[in-house]
Image (tube, helix red, strand yellow):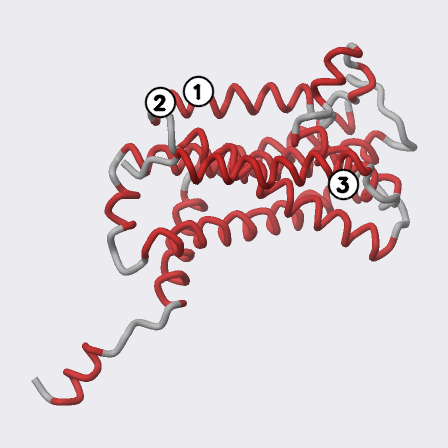
Amino acid sequence: MSATQALRERAPTPPLRPLLAQTGAELYMTLRRGETLLLTLGIPVVFLLFFSKVNVVSTPGTTPADFFVPGILALAVMSTAMVSLGIATGFERGYGVLKRLGSTPLGRPRLLGAKIVTIVAVELVQAAVLLPVGIGLGWSPGGGGMPAVAAAVGAVLLGSTAFAGVGLLMAGTLRAEVNLAAANGLYLILLLLGGMIVPISKLPAAVQDVAKLLPAEALSAALHATLGHGSAPPVESWIVLAVWAVAAPVAAALTFRWE
């Protein structure tokens, strides 16, 4: 072995190289899973087209799309950050993938970082698909300009953190099959209580009080305000999102089992 080859072998691996490699692998696996694409892109687009064109639910606003575009975007964030991430991570844990990857030079922090970057990338794709479809259906932003856009992005980031924490909490504590059922069941509950498809004003008063404490309703309300009316999100939405964005990841970190 030459001296040059020996130096190359002893040279430390650039810290970003494992992260970028794992991010590429996460994106590849996400895009080749048909059920993930159905959950993160197919169902939101079908819901947006169906509910905007079929008068099933009476909604406020000039056109149905004015209500459903922000709501379905919130649904898409929940699908990606909680359900898709949680189910995939749960099966990786069950198969021993997380244990093996965590012991490689990649390490656990960069493994989680790769998953976070993947979530953000998928959410950007969702927005790039849903917003033009919404415009074609008659949705128009509320006219809040850059402040409303910045508030919407902030709400999405907080919501993504909260939902990811919930997904990882289930993935790190439940068996893969139980986690699959729990994630889908929670998805349906939050879909019904989150003001994404059915306006929260149509729910019983007691149910409304519970729903307003959940991250789904808080994110939906924030996006309805910013992308629907061009106004600032309600203060209570920021509070609920912030609490869940801290509490859920902390709970996941404290209870997560890697094997």
199 or 62, nearer to the observer = 199
Quickly name the residue at label 2.
177
Residue 134, numbered label? 3
* SS for dot 3: helix
Q: Earlier in the sequence, mark 3 or mark 2?
A: 3
Closer to viewer: mark 3 or mark 2 = 2
Marks 2/1 in contact by CB < 8 Å: the verdict is yes
Q: Quadrant of residue 73?
A: top right
Q: Residue at x 41, y 44 (%)?
A: 32
As rendered, which of 9 and 252 lies closer to the eye? 252
- Tell me if residue 168 comes above or below residue 203 in the rendering: below
Q: As shown in the figure, which amino acid type bears the numbered disc 3?
A: Gly
- Give the percent coordinates (x, y) of residue 238: 74, 40
Answer few, some or many: residues within 10 Å of disc 2's Cα (few below 14, many 20 plus, some between 14 and 19): few
Indicate the position of residue 90 as horizontal and vertical percent values. Answer: 37, 33
> The C terminus appears in which quarter of the rendering?
top left
Residue assigned mark 1: 181
How far separated are the C-alphas under marks 2 and 1? 7 Å
